[in-house]
Structure formats: structure tokens, C-alpha cells
Amino acid sequence: MTTLASPRLEGPDDMAALFSDMYGKGITDGLPVIPPREEYVQAMIAHVELPPDQIIAIIPPEGGPATVEKLAANAVMAGCLPEYFPVVIAAIRALAEPRYNLLGIQTTTNPVTPVLVMNGPIRREIGIQAGRGCMGPGFRANATIGRAVKLALLNIGGCPPGDVSKSIHGFPGRFTFCFGELEEESPWQPLHVELGFQRQDSTVTVFGGQGTQNLYACFRQPESIVHMVADGMACYGNNGYMRGSGNPLVVFSPGHAKVFAEHGWDKTRIKEELFRRTLVPLAGIAEERQLSHPIYLDWDASRSIPLCREARDIMIVVAGGPEAYHVTYIPSFASTDMVTCKIDAARP
Amino acid sequence: MQYLDPRSPNLSKTLFVPAAGDLKGKTLGFLNNGWLSMAKIGKYIEGPLKAKYGVARVLYYDVPRSMEPPAGLLEKVADECHMVIVGMAN
């Protein structure tokens, strides 16, 4: 057992009173938490066999050092099992990559939150849900890993909502947002392989997502599906149209993926179709230009605004129940790029 | 019940710069991330900065919105200014 450096806090023994006490200290997300007692935190750290004082990342805006010990305490609070902890560490590493723009995501008025997509064998090993209902609620690994990351960003980054996190409305996905790709039911390369990793690698990819848009696309022809999905994506109030960057994320069910595959459509073709169909003619939007200096501020009125830089920046993941009914679109905060981190790298 | 504090304060404050101190005769920079209101606010503040606090010069630099500035820009700003305000105005 290693020595832990964190100050010890005292609270009531009664669980309900303890929660109120912890809530009053501003260290929760408003939902009940597991108190990070030393033995629980020790068990979490023991699973990764990393020194408790090892700094995984510096978390903005406060610049707090995310040590293994502090991350473990937040993982305990979220309800993680120790075997989930390597994923939390990998996710924090990914979030801290400069191109993810964690400072912006922590403090913006936008409702953006980290969206964690899991790939590889770890999904099965720790029970990450990738099938029906994968975005929640009801699955411990999904729920608590995403929550641990958010609690760490709150407590280590010093980012309470209202005072520092300036999101106008917030978003329920800010409690937790984590799911797996259903690779076994996908006709295509899984996300992490598309991004250059090996199929047997376990990875977490972090997106900056500003919500979910459900699209009911009960069709049997690929053209109909992309028509419907593109219509839902072509909302120029999404940040993508203001910045022309980021990674819009489209989550198809295995059923929709099968329809595409049976007609010979691969991810590249779908991305190209979506990119082309989501161009928004500048002539069709409000004449007044937004104060936040959109990319099209000085463009000729005959041009159209793209959702992101290029078609390949639209990312496609297969997850959820099998029916070819619903598609989930996760618009990007846009001032962010997705980052993938290998989970093995966070293990001993 | 005793438990560990999950917070991790930046005790060393290594990421923060020292207080600006006296402004008299100094060159002040504004990093403008493109919000249209920032250009107006910067110009508005420039008056009292010079008249009331004796700032000698105010320079403006455009930076990307919500993203890292291009390589070399911050070094250039550091060379040209005594202090800098990140202007967002949103």
C-alpha cells in the first residue's frame, strides 16, 4: 500500500448527510457519489500500478495536476470499478492533447462535453455497452467512466458550472457520455482502425459533442437515409458552420450499416454524400452576421457553408440496437479535434 | 467519515503570470479572438488605459477563435508588449 498525499476531509457517517456535506463542498455533480475513502482509492491505484503522484495531465482552467491519486479519487466517487480506471486515465490523456482544446471546452458558453467512444477488446473485458441503449442510462461502465472524467474535470480543473463553466444551458450529457462501438456488427473498419490503430488495440476516442440529434430514418435505400440524416445535420446554428472545423459524429445502428453495406456503400461514400448534402447556401441564412466572426463573414453570397473542413472529418460509428430506425447525430463544438488514446498505454 | 479530497489545486501557480503592476509607459497588447464586440471594447478601453493609467501604446493581435494561436505569435507578442489581455468579449 502506497502513501497518499491528499488532505483528508471529514464528513458525517450517515450516507445522506455525507452526500449533502460533499455537495456543499462543491465536489459533486449534483448526484450522489461514493466517498473516496483511502482503501477505495488504494484499490483503484493498485489496479494500474502507477505511482500515485504521477501526473497524467494538467487540467485547465485552474491548471490542476491530474495525478493518478486524484484521478483515482474521482473515479471512486463516480462509482468506477478498479478495472475501469485505465480507461479513465487514457481518456484524460486524450482530453489534454492541445488539439482537443480542453480549456475552451471547459469554459465556453456552448453546452459541449467530452464524448468518449470505446474500441477494441476492453469493451468486452469491462462490460462497455455498445449495443441497444449504449448512450444510457443503465450500464455501469459507460455511466461511471464518463462520469469519472467529468468529475475530474470539475475537481482537478477547478471548473464549477456558473462561475467558471459558462455554458448557457448545460446539457444532460455533461453528467456522463461514454459508449462503445459495436465492431462485431459493423460491416466496416471500426473507428480506431480507421484512425491507424490495430483491431486488437483498445482505445478511447474523445470528441467534443454539443448534444444529440435523433433522426428517424426508417428506409431501405442508402440515398433515403443520407437524405434524411443530412437534413438533420444541416443546421447552421451548430458550431461547425461557424468555424468550418471539428468532427461531426454520426452513429448508425447495425441495421443502417447493413443497408449501406448491402448496397456497396462504404464509410468514405457516406461521408462524401453527407458533406455535399450538408452544404448550406449562404444566400439562405439570416443576412445579419453573428458577432462571433463566423468563417463566412466576408464570403460572397453565392457560396455555401461547409459543416467541417472536409468530408473525411465526418466520423461514423456503428452502435446501438439492431433496427434500421434511428440515427444519432452528435454535432461538434468545432473548435476542437477528436483525439484517440490507446488504453494499453495507461496500463502498467 | 474520513475521505480523500478529490480536488487538486494548482499550488505552485506555475501556469500563471505575475501581476502586471504599474501600467505607466508600458505597451499593452490585446489578443482579439474575432468576436466583433471585442474590436469595439478594445478601442473603448484604450482611452482610459492611456488617459487614466498612462499606458504608452496599445497593440492589437488577431488570434484564432477558441483555439491555440499559430506558432510564434505569442513569442512575437511577448517581444512587443509588456503585458497582454486576452480579449474574448462574448
Image: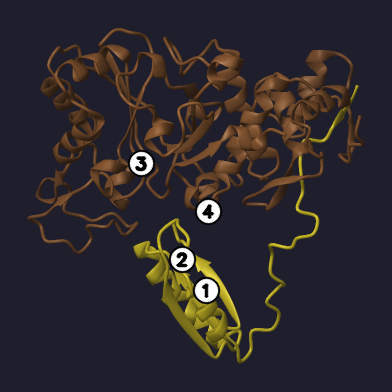
Chain colours: A brown, B yellow
- Residue type at numbered disc 1: Leu
Which residue is under mark 4?
A98
- Farthest residue to the left: give it: A302
Amino acid tagged 2: Pro
Q: CA distance from mark 1 to mark 3?
A: 27 Å
Residue at (46, 61) in percent of width and height: B88
Q: Which chain contains the residue that carries disc 1? A: B
Which label sits on residue A247?
A: 3
How far, Cα to Cα, is label 2 from label 3? 20 Å
Q: Amino acid at mark 3?
A: Asn
In the rendered structure, find residue B69 and report the number of the disc placed on it.
2
Q: Are marks 2 and 3 on the same chain?
A: no
Residue located at (34% from left, 64% from top): B36
Taking A313 as reference, is A226 left or right?
A: left
Label whose residue precedes the other's in the sequence (4 or 3): 4
In the rendered image, the vertical position of residue A114 relative to residue B55, given as above or below: above
**Proximity of marks 2 and 3: CB atoms separated by less than 8 Å:** no
Q: Which residue is mark 1?
A: B74
Question: Which SS class for mark 1?
Answer: helix
The answer to whether the residue labelled 1 contacts the one labelled 2, judged by CB atoms less than 8 Å apart, is: yes
Cα gap from disc 4 to disc 2, whole angstroms: 11 Å
Query: Mark 2 — on which chain does it sit?
Result: B
- Frontmost of labels 1 and 4 is 4
Tell me the quadrant of the picture where the N terminus of chain A can be found: top right
Mark 2 or mark 1, which is nearer the start of the sequence? 2
Q: Is residue A320 above or below residue A74?
A: above
